[in-house]
Image (cartoon, helix red, strand yellow):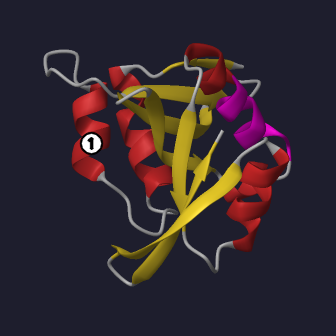
Amino acid sequence: MIRHARPTDAPTLARLQTYLREPSPGLLDAALDADAYSPATVLVATADDGRPVGYLLAVPGDGTTYVAELVVDPDHRREGIATALLSACAARSERLTVTVAPDDEAARSLYRRCGFEEARRLPDFFADGAAILYRR
C-alpha cells in the first residue's frame, strides 16, 4: 500500500535513509515535521503489517517534481515497490526528474523501465562525482 508519510514513521524512514548514497536527513525531517513549512512530500510503501518498507521524497519546483530520495528496504527489493512509489508520485505530478549516479545501474535500469529518459550529465553533482539527470 502507498500512503503519505506520518511523523510517527520518522524512525523507520531514518533507518531506510541509511541505505542511500547521499541522504538528506534535514530535508526528510522537514517534510515529516507537521509544524515546519516544507513543500516536500514523502510517500511511503508499507508491508502487509503496515510497517514502512520504502519511501519516496519528492520536491516540487519549476514545472517538475524532483525525486530527491527513493529507497526500499533490501529485504523487499524486486517486489515492485519502487515502481509503485514512482507511479504514485507521477499521478500527482505531470513531470518528474531524478539524478542518479552513473555507476548505479540498478537505479538507472529502474528509471528507464518507468519511462524516464536520460537528459544530461551533471559533473560534480554528488560529493563523490557526477550524476545523470533523468526526466519523465
Q: Is residue 104 above or below residue 53?
A: below
Q: Quadrant of the N terminus?
A: top right
Q: Position of residue 3 (x, y in %)?
A: 58, 16
Q: Position of residue 54 (x, y in %)?
A: 61, 40
Q: Is residue 26 left or right of residue 84?
A: left
* Residue occupying the point 22% across, 33% down: 30
Q: Is residue 90 above or below residue 117?
A: above
How many tags in the picture?
1
Q: Is residue 103 left or right of residue 75?
A: left
Q: Quadrant of the C terminus?
A: top right
Q: Is residue 7 left or right of residue 17?
A: left
Amino acid at pointer 1: Leu
Q: Is residue 81 magenta?
A: yes
Is residue 50 visible in the rendered image? The answer is no
Q: Position of residue 39 (x, y in %)?
A: 28, 23
Towards the viewer: 32 or 91: 91
Please give the range of residues in magenta.
Answer: 79-87
* Residue occupying the point 50% across, 51% down: 16
Q: Secondary structure at mark 1?
A: helix
Towards the viewer: 28 or 135: 135
Residue found at the very far bottom of the displayed protein: 128
Q: Main secondary structure of the magenta part?
A: helix
Q: Is residue 124 above or below residue 99?
A: below
Q: Position of residue 27 (x, y in %)?
A: 27, 42
Q: Give the crowd class for mark 1: few <14, some 14-19, many >=20 residues within 10 Å.
A: some
Q: Is residue 25 left or right of residue 104?
A: left
Is residue 131 visible in the rendered image? The answer is yes
* Residue occupying the point 71% across, 51% down: 117
Q: Is residue 12 magenta?
A: no
Residue found at the very far front of the displayed protein: 119
Residue 119, by quadrant, is bottom right
Q: Read off the residue under disc 1.
A: 27
